[in-house]
Image: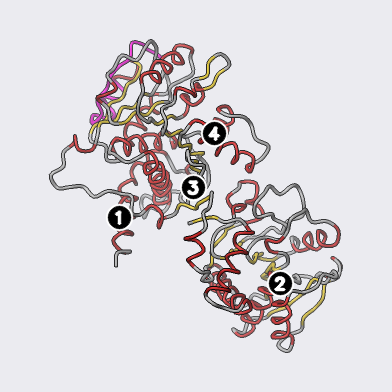
Amino acid sequence: MKIYTAAQIRNWDLFTIAHAPIASIDLMERAAQAFLKALEAEKELAGHPCFLICGPGNNGGDGLAVARLLLEKGHPVAVYVVNLGASPSTDFRINYQRLKNRCAIFEIRSAEDFPVLPPESILIDALLGTGLSRPLKGPLARIVQQMNTGPAFRVAVDIPSGLLADEASAEREIFKADLSITFEVPKLAFLMPENETFVGKWRVASIGLHPDFAQQNPANYYFSNEKAVKSLPRPRADFSHKGTFGHALLIAGSQGKMGAALLCSHAALASGAGLVTAHIPSCGYNILQTALPEVMVETNPGKACLQGAFTGNLREYAAIGVGCGLGQSPETRLFLQSLLTQCQSPIVVDADAINLLKTDDLDLRALLPPGSILTPHIREFARLSRPAAHSWERLEILQNFAQVYEVYVILKGRYSALATPEGEVFFNETGNSGMATAGSGDVLTGLLTGLLAQGYSPREAALLGMYLHGKAGDLALHAPPPFQKSEETLLARDLIAHFGAAFLFLKQSSVNSEP
């Protein structure tokens, strides 16, 4: 799913009006109906008085249309129009006329006019929309401040008032929604950590914008969901054998961190790789051979950490993953340099290997094979590139880094962001806060390496891998009794246990979508 800027979405509206064709007021009615349907799916409305705060623009026109639809369904409604002297839009005027004889419409000229909200009320924000280009100040800011007080369930129409859709929002008054219902595609601002307090839970309501616009107009940002990746898993031929699905090499572990090597090796096997070899320091030999007999073990001369030159034959392996539990000793840094010097094909780089790529006295980033997949979390990425003032700047740095080094970078977190060498960014739909636990990243590394070993391209492996990783976490979190989990109790090994269910979910989705 493409993520468009606010300006592009306005052009999409105009394109739809011209090519559907449809009158703008009818498109607004369609938006109101879609909004209400999405709201009813998320919140029981019966018995809850609904307060709508409408501005004079088209966002306010949406709100007036929603108010009329609520009245038609028998819900108690109170409508307030903010009047600070701005001229109403044409479609606002039309919906005002449609509504004025059905209920009282009150004016708000200052924060003092804001109503007292009774308990259990629903407050619908239809004040500003996406046209905002500067911080709120004066009476508008004070009105939004009032909207954030009182005992109400808060819902934003399209975008919380005061929030900028396409750039960082400085400290200012912004509506704090419990639920944001946006139209057609998500706003980029919804995917930024700083905005969680304002956006709350968000849902996309389709209003039937013309599909030709999306086909004809490119985007830099995408939302990677089930629909985007369901065609990626490959069927297996009946006469396949373990050699068919590749040999993965995991280079991992150090004294006290052999669990990381164990997790990534296990994940590579569970991803479908035919063979997995773990190259580890000798201190971990008994651990891996005992805990994971399906994995072949190759020991390094170093006992507590990897050291010396890598002397294996890389041609034996279809894919390589490096970094999990590696440590950051000077000996390991030189080992990594030796490995990267020999690598000719894309590899997966995680954790300590990322930390070692750029150090004070050594810069190994230029040795990365084009098409490699890096999987840093935010702090690791800051060390790899440079610190950012906020998520928007970090996004720019991420895109630039992937292009300069011709690599794929998965910046891990809620809505993990995959930056490609072509400058695109794919935000991942799946995952939950329970995955913020030790070893979760090691599991992702093993999964990605296993997919590469099976012949998936780096782009396919990155898109499919981060989706499956998050989906496995979601399925683990909602496992049936007696295997129930909470965000607090989710473990990295639970993700691996649900790889199969995640694969089956996508395969079934693909079958169900066939004509």
Residue topped by disc 2: 60
Residue topped by disc 1: 507
- Is 35 left or right of 119, judged from the image as shown? left
- Is 106 left or right of 378, judged from the image as shown? right
Q: Amino acid at mark 3?
A: Phe
- Say above or below: 308 vs 263: above
Q: CA separation, marks 1 and 2?
A: 43 Å
Q: Amino acid at mark 2?
A: Gly
- Is 423 left or right of 92, judged from the image as shown? left
- Dot 2: element: helix
Q: Amino acid at mark 4?
A: Phe
Mark earlier in primary sequence (2, 4):
2
Q: Where does the magenta region start and end? A: 286-305
Q: CA separation, marks 2 and 3?
A: 32 Å
- Dot 4: element: helix
Residue topped by disc 4: 401
Res. 426 mark: 3
The residue at the point 82 percent across, 76 percent down is 107
The residue at the point 40 percent across, 51 percent down is 484
Query: Dots 2 and 3: beta carbons under 8 Å?
Result: no
Q: CA separation, marks 1 and 3?
A: 21 Å
